[in-house]
Structures are given as C-alpha cells and as structure tokens.
Amino acid sequence: MTIIMGILNVTPDSFSDGGRFAQTDAAIARGLELRDAGAAIVDVGGESTRPGAVKVDPAQEQERVIPVVQALAQDGVAVSIDTMNAATALAAIDAGAQLVNDVSGGLADEGMARVVAETGVHYAVMHWRGGADVAPAFTDVVAEVRAELKARVAELVVAGVDPAKIVLDPGLGFGKAPEHNWALLGHFDEIASLGHGILIGASRKRFVGELLPDDAPMADRDLPTAVISALVARQGAWAVRVHDVPSTRLALAVAAAVTEGAS
Ligand code: PMM
C-alpha cells in the first residue's frame, strides 16, 4: 500500500502555499492537519527548491524547521526532514525526524552520508544534477536517471549507509522538461527495478500545471496530482509526496480497490 508524505513547507517563498505557514504555530497546526487527513509522514522543509529560489543559510533553515519537527514528533507524527544540509538533518533527527529527504541525494553536502549512516534513519535519495535551475539535458532520460541513481546508491553504501534504508526518487521537475517527467512516470518500472522503494513528487509541479488552462489556480493541480498518485500506486510506489492529502488519499483508495479487484 502506497503511503502519503504530506508536504509542509516552512518557507516564506514557497510557491505552493505562499508562505502562509511560515510561522511555527501555523506550521505545526498544518502538520497535524496533514496527519489527520491521512499523511503517514509529514515532510518538513525550510528551504524552497523551486526554480529561482534563494539559498537559505543552514542556521536560518534550522530556526524555521527544528521547532516544527520537535512539536510534531512529540505529538506522534512521523516526520521527514527535507534538507540538503547535513547539519540540519542531524538537528532534525535529534528533534525526532525519522527520515531524511535529500533532493540532492547526498551530492550537496558530503557530510550527509555520515549523518544518515550513523543515525540509521531512512534516507530518500532524489535524482539531482545540481538544482532546479539546471537546464534539462538528456538523450535517454530513463536510462540516465536510473544509472545515476544506481551510482548514487553505490557511493552511499560505501560511505556506510544501509541500503535497506534507502528509497529512491526520480526527481520530477528538477532539471527535467515535461516530456522527461512523463517518460519517468511512464517507465516507473525501470526505476523500481533498482530494488528500492520509490518516492514520487509530482504534486502541483509545472509539468502538471501544463495540462490546465494558463490562468488555473495552483489548487487545480491537485486533481491531476491525485491521478498520478493512483497510477504510481498501481505500479507499487512506496510513497507519494503531495500538498493536498485528501484528494490523493481518495485516489489511493481507488487504486487499492482496483488492485484488490484484480487479485
Ligand atoms: N520536490 C520538491 C521538494 N522536495 N523531495 C522529493 N523527495 N521529491 C520531490 O520531487 C521534491 C522534494 C519541490 O516541490 P515543493 O516546493 O512543492 O515542495
């Protein structure tokens, strides 16, 4: 059964929530709401990775996320920390985070592998070639992403990370054109054949928005996002990372019912 990772961006410049949850109390309340709506994990991030976003300094990042991680963990919420910084990951693990979600897959901070190895937390390793602003350059996106993720896993294992703790993410929208994202979704099996759980982050991304009229509000992207959730659930995805939990929860229930019907 595919689980839901609810997105909690604690950033003033997050494109998808307009920074509404920048304040700690509001962020904690939103995290609890995500859990109550059906998120098995709440993914707390303090640095926007959207194209053009400014880098935050790790101290500022920690100021944003650590009180939120701590409060949610104390309330029994399973928390993941969305960070590329080893120091932030370690502080979040100390505050109760159970999973590190690293969009750089360990490439941005060479200290990350050690933090993950020594603490024994789960590690979501995303495909990344240097950020959201990197121009898409693929001749065979599925083969290249697969090979690069495989190489990443090999390096992390050498650095001491337990392969059983690694989940992989093809990194939709990160240095990828719409056709690359659709190809990765269409060839889900080839990424899954690496033998790790697969995390998919399609929620509200620009390539999803391209299916809608130009003036469609951000929330209109939740329906196509939920459809993607159902499709990848049918392919055995470990988790989907989404902003709107109720729509994806329903979509996953449909997928589960169809799977049950086929058994
Ligand atoms: N996308 C974003 C941020 N973190 N983490 C993972 N594992 N996979 C993703 O696709 C991903 C991520 C950017 O989206 P957001 O700004 O809406 O959170």
Image (cartoon, rainbow, N blue to C red):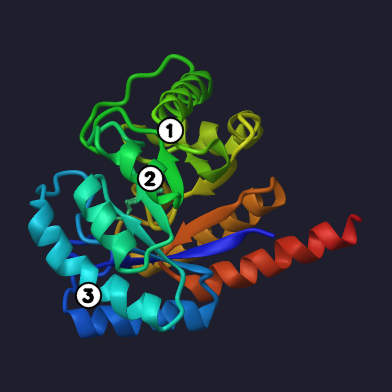
Q: Which residue of the protein is positioned furthest toward the top in this rendering?
A: 139
Establish if 192 lies above or below 81.
above
**Residue at 42% across, 30% down:** 156
Element carrying mark 1: loop
To which quarter of the image does residue 38 belong? bottom right
Check whether the beta carbons of the residues at disc 1 and disc 2 lie within 8 A of each other: yes
Name the spot of residue 244 as percent of width and height, x first. Answer: 45, 70
Work out whether residue 76 or residue 18 is closer to the camera in this orientation and state it.
Answer: 76
Kindly identify which residue carries mark 2. Answer: 118
Establish if 222 lies above or below 57.
below
Q: Amino acid at mark 1?
A: Gly
Element carrying mark 2: helix
Kindly identify which residue carries mark 3. Answer: 67
Query: Residue 160 bears which disc, if any?
Result: 1
Q: Quadrant of the N terminus?
A: bottom right
Name the spot of residue 93 as percent of width and height, x first. Answer: 33, 60
**Residue at 9% across, 57% down:** 59
- Describe residue 35's horizontal placement relative to residue 197 as left or right: left
Name the spot of residue 243 as percent of width and height, x first. Answer: 40, 66
Q: Quadrant of the C terminus?
A: bottom right
Q: Earlier in the sequence, mark 2 or mark 3?
A: 3
Q: Residues within 10 Å of mark 1 (few under 14, many from 20)?
A: some
Q: CA distance from mark 3 to mark 1?
A: 29 Å
Q: CA distance from mark 1 to mark 2?
A: 8 Å
- Describe residue 234's horizontal placement relative to residue 87 as left or right: right
Work out whether residue 113 or residue 185 is closer to the camera in this orientation and state it.
Answer: 113
Work out whether residue 171 or residue 180 is closer to the camera in this orientation and state it.
Answer: 171
Q: Earlier in the sequence, mark 3 or mark 1?
A: 3
Q: Residues within 10 Å of mark 3 (few under 14, many from 20)?
A: some
Q: Is residue 12 visible?
A: no
**Residue at 16% across, 62% down:** 62
